Amino acid sequence: MPTSESPRRSLRYEVRHSDRDAVRTIVERTGFFRADEIDVAVELVDEHLARGLASGYYFVFAEIEGAVVGYSCYGPIACTMASYDLYWIAVDPTQQGQGVGRQLIQATEAGIAAAGGRRIYIDTSGQPKYAPTRAFYERSGFRCAARLVDFYAPGDDRLIYEKVVAEEWKSR
């Protein structure tokens, strides 16, 4: 008898060699990134595969029936006491709007908090096509803390979003 249940989504934290292709495919399919940026996303997977946790790159993969449909990559910011960068969060376009990104953000925040992290930073572009990305960050509790004009290219500002994840730092 057919069922109307949606496929079960799960999270995975260990990095596998097959994640290289999954990350490349997801980031390419978003249509937001240049070839060199896509290569960087895959390089972070390679760095983790080569060095493990010593790489400073941590991952959360969202899967449906074993297929990766989204991921996040984060890590501590060097020379800070408790600040983290969320380097990448990407969801396959066929799965966007279904809670995958929200689940990845929540798992990433939990991992950062468990590691003693206090603040999370995310960089994104100020171009109009990134408006949905910025709206997602804002719905997730991030605020735009800085704008660096013409950072990526003329007319392409860098926006830095932040979120405080530990109460004792919220008063600052």
Image (tube, rainbow, N blue to C red):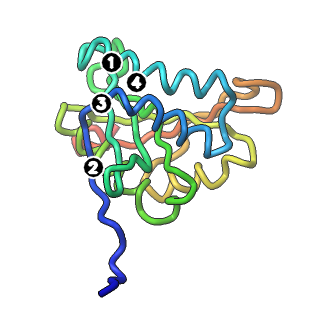
Distance between mark 3 and mark 1 Cα atoms: 25 Å
Q: Which residue is drawn at 40% across and 24% down?
A: 45
Measured from the top left, where is residue 141 in percent x and y?
A: 42, 53
Which type of secondary structure does the marked residue at label 1 adopt?
A: loop
Query: Mark 3 highlights which residue?
Result: 15
Q: Name the residue under label 4.
A: 45
Residue ID at (62%, 46%): 30
User: Of label 3 and label 1, which has the lower sequence position?
Assistant: 3
Q: Label 4 sits on what residue type?
A: Val
Circle 3/circle 4 CB separation < 8 Å: yes
Mark 3: amino acid? Val
Q: What residue type is labelled 1?
A: Thr
Please name whichever residue, 86 or 162, is drawn nearer the observer in this view of the structure: 86
Q: Which mark is residue 80?
A: 1
Amino acid type, label 2: Leu
> How busy is the neighbourhood of tag 1: few (under 14 within 10 Å), some, or many (20 plus)?
few
**Label located before the other in sequence (3 or 4):** 3
66 vs 108: above or below: below
Q: Which mark is residue 11?
A: 2
